Image (spheres, helix red, strand yellow):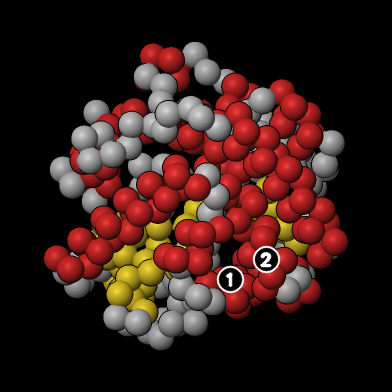
Amino acid sequence: MLKRYWTTIIILILCITSVAGPPASAQTNDQQITERESQEALELAQQFTTRFLETKDLTPIVKELYVTDFIERYKQARAVNPDFNKAPHLYFVPGLEYNSRLLTEANAEDWQRFYVAANNFILFGFVSVIKKSPKEIEDLKVTDLYPASVIKLLSRNPNLANMIEKKGGSRPIGSAEEMRNSTAVLEQANAAMREKLQGKPAAKIDNKGLIGKMNGDDFFKPHLQVMDEEFFGFPKGTRVVLITTPLLYQLMLVSTESKLKILWADPYTGD
């Protein structure tokens, strides 16, 4: 039942554009996830969820729960991915693409601000709808997830115009300056979303709500991938744990400093 509920939300939010995740790699699943990995993954998914609902910002989550150099690892992995040469315009989050030159031209600080701002914006869309019942969701439109002022703000930026509702061909971010400008607009939109959500009760994601159901529902069950080649700068044989959070973000986890940390997180696409 939960999966059907979340699938309805996914279709609503991600129907605006085709999506693709971060760079993939050859993998084998011969090994089984350990009990420790499974428990740590569940705890990280819960922390990711509760911390975002508390702070309404990925910034402290990135600092506390992510691999320290995740952005540099992403840039390097994306640059050697076959897509880098096949298509100059690469997916980042739904409705937002960038020119592959930015993997080398934009610095890590610009990239991290961009990552936080873009994913904050997508997460606010999920939070806006997550408290609705399945019947209410059926009647929602993508444009119901954000205030009219936010929709207007993004529509004025050609790089961001398709993030809420696809209206035609997108214009990928083509320079470091455009990346910084787009980040600033997204940060302004996120500030408006925080104000809108200020003082409103959080979604029922607690030990008696969805978090309590994570342990017993296959939709939130972590699974293991063992890489057959170098992955995000980690060596062949790296164990990668994937888990979906109640905020519909899939976490990619690796062990560093003897514990699992988030290597990457982006919207769950139903894959």
Q: Residue at x 62, y 73 (%)?
A: 75
The residue labelled by disc 2 is 111
Would residue 192 appear left or right of 246 to someone viewing this image? right
Q: Position of residue 228 (x, y in %)?
A: 36, 79
Q: Secondary structure at mark 1?
A: helix
Q: Nearer the viewer, residue 150 or 202?
A: 202
- Check disc 2 and give the amino acid type: Trp
Q: Position of residue 111 (x, y in %)?
A: 67, 65
Q: Position of residue 159 (x, y in %)?
A: 78, 47
Residue 60 higher or lower than 167, as above or below:
below
Residue 246 higher or lower than 137, as above or below:
below
Question: Can residue 266 be spotted in the picture?
Answer: yes
Q: Secondary structure at mark 2?
A: helix
Residue 173: quarter of image:
bottom right
Q: Are marks 2 and 1 in contact (CB under 8 Å)?
A: yes
Question: Can residue 77 be spotted in the picture?
Answer: no
Farthest bottom residue? 235
Would residue 247 appear left or right of 194 to someone viewing this image? left
Q: Which mark is residue 71?
A: 1
Would residue 26 appear left or right of 76 to someone viewing this image? left
Q: Nearer the viewer, residue 246 or 206?
A: 206
- Give the mark nearest the N terminus, 2 or 1: 1
Residue 209: quarter of image:
top left
Q: Position of residue 192 (x, y in %)?
A: 68, 35
Q: Residue at x 60, y 56 (%)?
A: 116
Residue 151: quarter of image:
top right
- Check disc 1 and give the amino acid type: Ile
